[in-house]
């Protein structure tokens, strides 16, 4: 009896292992077959970009595709977001997969047939619109993932929630949007999400490679506004003034001591940047006020608290010492938490990434001081965010055009690896969380 039970369990285990391998083979075959379609989708999105909360054409294409696959959809989430729900043939966890949809106010310079010629108005100015960060590729990849997984739904042990999110790059003043708004509108509920995965194409990582980091992979960000108020005077009589330009210069210099003297950069980096300074309109008039705008980046709540406190103290006290006043607003218009990869989830899913791309092609990366609103999902549920190579093989990453620039360029041959990675992360996570061994 005992021998028969052991034999039965062994047969069951072998059968389950064979089924896992079969699913992975199916993913490879189906993803490879969709490679040209992914490129077609991406080029269409690239040629017709839309800014945050205006992704009407984009979301319509996505919704139609998901519906054609028999996936239940919700539209108009956080203004233009689309959510698809695919129920597998067996009970199990709920896995969310996210792609962002918005372009940027950038005029494209890349010489490709599908280059964007779109123009629109942003913050009262006429601007170009370009997918200068790769969101077009994210959408195309996730559309293919939806097609692959929907074709295998009878074998899935759980539910997949496809999140196509607007406004990752932020919205115009006075609007709400992005991941934060999607979370507020319940995107992680009904059904409740157990884990979420996302990827970002990277123009300075070679195609065929995936990079990851457990813990803080992308910085938390606060933007800030500092208003310095002094006393105006004729430029020929500066002794009659309290010069807010001189005070602002002193504040900017003093802010540089925050990271160098208060943050242990051997553990985590941090950034304090003033990106804009506005004051005065003539060479011979000392103005009354100066406005400075800047950004703070940190990888831990403690470091973020330090940055906010030090900026506030330095700005106000430096101004006070010169007889001026400084008003500091942090955050000024937006705050993203740290993009934090759950350490247990990261270690659990690392073998899945290594099987998909090859161990030598899955690389540990340093933290990125850019920010991502994927972090709002990770505040609520365990999440893993990875980078997918999009730089042509053999290219120099130092010379490769960076994100958010007019020359941003992506090698489309890397997309199929992204499709396989998200499919396998989903299937493998479901397997580890069910009784199906």
Image (cartoon, rainbow, N blue to C red):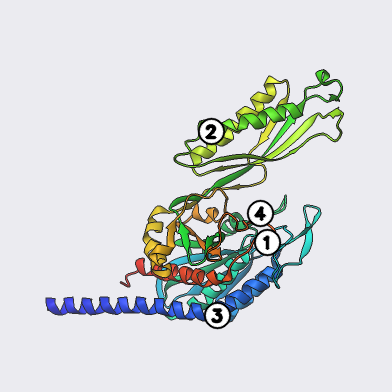
Q: Secondary structure at mark 1?
A: loop
Crowding near pointer 1: few (<14 within 10 Å), some, many (20+)? many
Q: Which residue is mark 1?
A: 103
In depth, the one of 261 and 159 nearer the eye is 261
Of the residues tagged 3 and 4, which is closer to the observer? 4
Say whether disc 4 or disc 1 marks the residue closer to the N-terminus. Answer: 1
Q: Which residue is the site of mark 2?
A: 260
Marks 4, 2: nearer the viewer: 2
Residue picked out by circle 4: 170
Q: Which residue is mark 3?
A: 70
Q: What whole-number distance in Å separates the C-alpha atoms at marks 4 and 1?
A: 10 Å
Residue 152 in view, yes or no: no
Q: For numbered disc 3, what is the local secondary structure?
A: loop
Residue 304 vertical placement versus 9 (above, below): above
* Residue at screen point 67% across, 63% down: 131
For the residues labelled 2 and 1, the Cα–Cα distance comes to 35 Å
């Amino acid at each position: 009896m005992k021998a028969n039970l052991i034999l039965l369990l062994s047969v069951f285990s072998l059968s389950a292992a064979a089924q896992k391998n079969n699913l992975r083979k199916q993913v490879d075959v189906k993803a490879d077959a969709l490679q040209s379609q992914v490129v077609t989708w991406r080029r269409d999105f690239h040629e017709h970009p839309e800014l945050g909360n205006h992704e009407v054409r984009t979301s319509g294409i996505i919704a139609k595709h998901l519906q054609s696959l028999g996936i239940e959809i919700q539209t108009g989430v956080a203004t233009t977001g689309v959510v698809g729900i695919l129920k597998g043939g067996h009970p199990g966890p709920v896995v969310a997969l996210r792609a962002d949809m918005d372009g940027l106010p950038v005029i494209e310079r890349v010489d490709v047939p599908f280059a964007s010629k779109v123009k629109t108005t942003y913050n009262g100015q006429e601007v170009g619109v370009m997918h200068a960060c790769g969101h077009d590729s994210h959408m195309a990849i996730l559309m293919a993932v939806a097609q692959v997984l929907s074709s295998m739904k009878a074998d899935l042990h759980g539910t997949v929630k496809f999140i196509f999110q607007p406004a990752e790059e932020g919205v115009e003043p006075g609007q709400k949007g992005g991941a934060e708004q999607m979370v507020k509108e319940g995107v992680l509920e009904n059904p409740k999400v157990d884990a979420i995965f996302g990827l970002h194409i990277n123009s300075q990582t070679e195609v065929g490679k995936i990079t990851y980091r457990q813990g803080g992979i992308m910085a938390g960000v606060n933007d800030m506004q500092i208003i310095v108020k002094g006393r105006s005077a004729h430029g020929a009589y500066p002794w009659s003034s309290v010069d807010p330009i001189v005070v602002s210069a002193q504040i900017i210099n003093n802010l540089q001591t925050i990271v160098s003297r208060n943050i242990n950069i051997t553990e985590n980096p941090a950034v304090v940047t003033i990106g804009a300074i506005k004051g005065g309109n003539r060479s011979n008039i000392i103005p009354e006020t100066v406005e400075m705008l800047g950004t703070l980046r940190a990888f831990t709540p403690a470091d973020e608290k330090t940055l906010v406190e030090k900026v506030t103290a330095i700005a106000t006290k430096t101004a006070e010492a010169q007889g001026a006043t400084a008003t500091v607003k942090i955050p000024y218009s937006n705050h993203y938490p740290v993009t934090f990869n759950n350490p247990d989830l990261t270690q659990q899913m690392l073998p899945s990434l290594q099987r998909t791309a090859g161990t030598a092609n899955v690389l540990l990366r340093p933290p990125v001081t850019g920010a991502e609103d994927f972090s709002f999902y990770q505040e609520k549920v365990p999440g893993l965010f990875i980078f997918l190579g999009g730089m042509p093989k053999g290219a120099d990453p130092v010379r490769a055009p960076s994100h958010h620039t007019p020359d941003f360029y992506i090698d489309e041959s890397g997309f199929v690896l992204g499709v396989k990675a998200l499919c396998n992360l989903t299937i493998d996570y479901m397997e580890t969380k069910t009784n199906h061994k």
